[in-house]
Image (cartoon, rainbow, N blue to C red):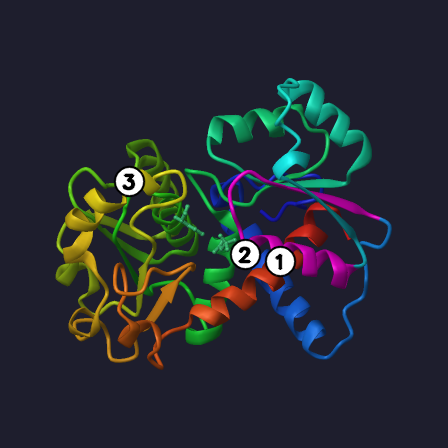
Amino acid sequence: MREDLKGSNLLKLSDLNPDQLDELLDRAVQVKSAIAQDRLTPTLSGKHIGIIMQKPSLRTRVSFEVACGKLGAQPIILEGDANAFSRGESIHDTVSTLSRYLDALVIRTYDDEFLAQVAEHATIPVINALTDGYHPCQGLADLLTIREHFGKLEGLVLAYLGDGSNNMAHTYLEAGALAGMDVRIAAPLGYHPDPSVLANAESIAADTGATITVMSDPDQAVKDAQIVITDTWASMGKEDEHDRRLAILEPFQVNAELMAHAADDAIFMHCLPAHRGEEVTDEVIDSSASQVFDEAENRLHVQAALLQAVLGT
Ligand code: CP
Ligand code: NVA
């Protein structure tokens, strides 16, 4: 059953049911077309959207700011010295205060438990702009990109290679489970998904008909896959593990040899920023199969649709 998203948080994709996900992607298609024709109605005029960035960002920050601008809303950026949480004020006091000024809060942070507490104390919608555990806005953009390319989501084979324990791997597990896809995660032992995230995705998959497989063989994962995805081997906050991870994850690099095992019409995806020569070669990311800038563009459209939906416009 479809339920209105007005007033809802989006902390992870599995906060949505499959119908809500579908509806949000449909709304994003409409937003994208309206933007292309320069006829997007500024339905968020007079609204103020807080954007808290506790980690660096290019795409997320700019796409949210542009989405606000196109919808007539005012973004309020809190980062660095202006970071809402930099003076030791309690989460309750900070978020209760922000809720009196703002209409929605977009936050990029580390710990998912911290984000959950922010959402608990907020009386406005809270949107996860990336945590250690999830990146739902990127997941929405990627699903839109895949749907645009193949005209459907259900039944497609999505292979994610690399750090299977990071926010993007977790997000693809949820995205694929909700959308009825065949999701394969290939990662070295020690870098497999969090068992509770995997169990949640499997329980969603049991209802949608999706299949989920976690493995350690990159060739097996990409065999006949329509979508081959990777992400950085050392996510934000793990930079000091970079050299160790490079050695362990090297067999999972997406290169032309690996792509040759995928389906003939396979596409390559990466949320960016990419580390060329590490998780992906120039040859693959610059190939005609690569959709990375469509993904980046679609961040704008899905986030505009999301802001409209949670603000009930
Ligand atoms: N993909 C993504 O979230 O990019 P940024 O870290 O630049 O925001
Ligand atoms: N897994 C990456 C995604 C960046 C958008 C990170 O968290 O750094």
Report which quarter residue 179 is drawn in.
bottom left
**Image position, residue 264 (x, y; %):** 24, 80
The amino acid type found where label 1 is placed reads: Val
Say if disc 2 is inside 8 Å of ligand 1.
yes
Residue matched to label 3: 193
Q: Spatial distance from mark 3 to mark 1, Cα to Cα?
A: 29 Å
Left/right of residue 94 with respect to residue 179 in the rendered view: right
Left or right of 284, for residue 249: left
Is residue 290 at all visible to an observer of this figure? yes
Helix, strand or loop at disc 1? helix
Looking at the picture, tell me which residue is in the foreground, 27 or 74. 74
Circles 1 and 2, Cβ within 8 Å, touching? The answer is yes
In the displayed structure, 43 sits above or below 151; it is above
Q: Quadrant of residue 104?
A: top right
Q: Determine if the C-beta at disc 1 is less than 8 A from ligand 1.
A: yes
Q: Which mark is residue 62?
A: 1
Q: Nearer the viewer, mark 3 or mark 1?
A: 1
Q: Residue at x 17, y 55 (%)?
A: 250
The structure residue drawn at horizontal position 60% and vertical position 57%, both measured from the top left corner, is 24
- Residue 43 location in percent, x, y? 81, 58
Question: For residue 152, which quarter of the picture?
Answer: bottom left
Residue underneath mark 2: 58
Q: Which mark is residue 19?
A: none
Q: Are marks 3 and 1 in contact (CB under 8 Å)?
A: no
Q: Could you tell me how many numbered marks the image carries? A: 3
The span picked out in magenta is: 47-71
Q: Are marks 3 and 2 in contact (CB under 8 Å)?
A: no
Please tell me which residue lies in front, 1 or 266.
266
The residue located at (15%, 73%) in the rendering is: 257
Q: Is residue 262 above or below residue 142?
A: below
For label 3, count other residues whose C-alpha is less than 10 Å away and answer few (under 14), some (14-19) or many (20+): many
